[in-house]
Image: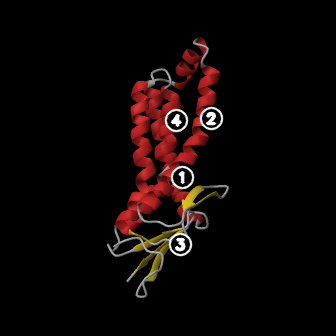
Amino acid sequence: MDTVQVLPENYKEVCSIDLQKNKKEALIVNGIGGAVSLAMYIIMEIRKPFMVWISEMADKGLLLPALAALILGTVIYVVLHEFTHGITMKCMGGKQVKYGFTGMYAFAGSSKDYFPKRQYICIALAPVVLWGIIFAVLQVFLRGWEWVVWFLQIMNIGGAAGDIYVTARVAGVSKTILVMDTGVSMTVYDM
């Protein structure tokens, strides 16, 4: 099935996910994301303690550039994460993508497109896979800057908890579903 802009007549809403409005779901997803982020922090702390890294960067006169790279990298990463969703939506046949920020979540979405299950899972997971690979490669080559890159990887994986949650929710349902993802809520339709 292809992405469509008109919901077929025999399709009805079967569920919706709105992490902006459903506080219980949001708490679960953000709790999982926080736990994953903490575990990743501990892994890196064991490998190279943060304070040791800070001291090394200060001794090299690179602490301020490293902190600036961390802050700027964080902002740029959030934008690139959402653009990755949007570009993937377009590649999967989406006609309209809107970007925004709700105060709690940055988003890419469409109120015009209904994505089939396979395409929707690709859209949801594209940023965590793409940026996960990029940050893993950078981790190998940017010796001395490992905490900057690792922090971005923590944001990538921990911050994708919502994308992974949505994927898990739609993965177990019918192959004939269509998903409308407006960016802050997803509605699943089926025959």
Mark 1 residue type: Glu
Residue located beneath label 4 in the image: 151
**Residue 165 visible in the displayed image:** no
Q: Earlier in the sequence, mark 2 or mark 1?
A: 2
> Which mark is nearer the camera, 1 or 4?
1
Query: Is tag 2's residue or tag 3's residue first in the polypeptide sequence?
Result: 2
In the picture, residue 132 is in which quadrant? top left
Residue flagged by tag 3: what amino acid is it?
A: Lys
Residue flagged by tag 4: what amino acid is it?
Answer: Phe
Q: Quadrant of the N terminus?
A: bottom left
Q: Which residue is mark 3?
A: 112
Mark carried by residue 95: none
**9 relative position to 27: left or right:** left
Q: Nearer the viewer, residue 167 or 28?
A: 167
Place of residue 148 in the rendered image (x, y in percent of width and height, measured from the top left):
53, 30
Q: Secondary structure at mark 3?
A: loop
Residue drawn at (35%, 64%) of the image: 118
Q: Position of residue 32 (x, y in %)?
A: 48, 52
Q: Nearer the viewer, residue 5 or 28?
A: 5
Answer whether labels 4 and 2 touch (C-beta < 8 Å).
no
Q: Amino acid at mark 2?
A: Ile
Q: Secondary structure at mark 4?
A: helix
Other-residue count near label 2 (Cα within 10 Å), few / some / many at <14 / 14–19 / ≥20: some
Residue 161 horizontal/vertical position (percent): 48, 53
In the drawing, what numbered circle is on residue 82?
A: 1
